Image (cartoon, helix red, strand yellow):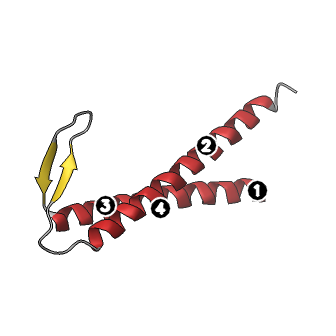
């Protein structure tokens, strides 16, 4: 039975990674939608990591960065999906 335990832990870890990626993708979709629907004259502020300081940023640049982040998250999710499918085939 000890041979199966690491596999269960590995599957559990991948499941957690997949759930975390799904959560991040949903979050990023909301950010992209919110930025997309802002009026042109609205100001956008970005919080600095690990602080309570916000800086004024360009809306279009921020929207572009968020879209790129969303694309990266989707790619990572797809890679996990593909690796699961190849394991099932083997």
Q: Give the residue number, with chain letter if any, for mark 3.
A: 66
Q: Give the residue number, with chain letter if any, for mark 1.
A: 88
Whichever of callouts 1 and 4 sits on the residue coming sooner in the sequence is 4
x and y percent of residue 44 in the render?
Answer: 17, 59
- Please state, as top left, top right, bottom left or bottom right, where the N terminus lies in the image: top right
Whichever of callouts 3 and 1 sits on the residue coming sooner in the sequence is 3
Whichever of callouts 4 and 2 sits on the residue coming sooner in the sequence is 2
x and y percent of residue 29 in the render?
Answer: 41, 64
Q: CA distance from mark 3 to mark 4?
A: 12 Å
x and y percent of residue 34 in the render?
Answer: 32, 67
Q: CA distance from mark 1 to mark 4?
A: 21 Å
Looking at the rendering, which quadrant does residue 48 occupy?
Answer: top left
Of tags 4 and 2, the one toward the viewer is: 2
Q: CA distance from mark 4 to mark 2?
A: 16 Å
Q: Is residue 44 above or below residue 54?
A: below
The circle drawn on residue 16 is 2
Q: Is residue 72 above or below residue 46?
A: below
Whichever of callouts 3 and 4 sits on the residue coming sooner in the sequence is 3
Seen at 24% across and 71% down, the residue is: 38
Whichever of callouts 3 and 2 sits on the residue coming sooner in the sequence is 2
Looking at the rendering, which quadrant does residue 32 occupy?
Answer: bottom left
- Please state, as top left, top right, bottom left or bottom right, where the C terminus lies in the image: bottom right
């Amino acid at each position: 039975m000890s041979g199966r335990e690491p596999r269960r832990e590995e599957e559990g870890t991948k499941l957690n990674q997949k759930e975390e990626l799904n959560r991040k993708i949903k979050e990023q979709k909301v950010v992209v939608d919110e930025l997309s629907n802002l009026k042109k004259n609205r100001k956008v502020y970005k919080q600095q990591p690990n602080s309570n300081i916000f800086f004024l940023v360009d809306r279009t640049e921020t929207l572009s960065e968020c879209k790129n982040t969303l694309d990266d998250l989707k790619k990572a999710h797809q890679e996990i999906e593909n690796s699961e499918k190849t394991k099932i085939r083997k």
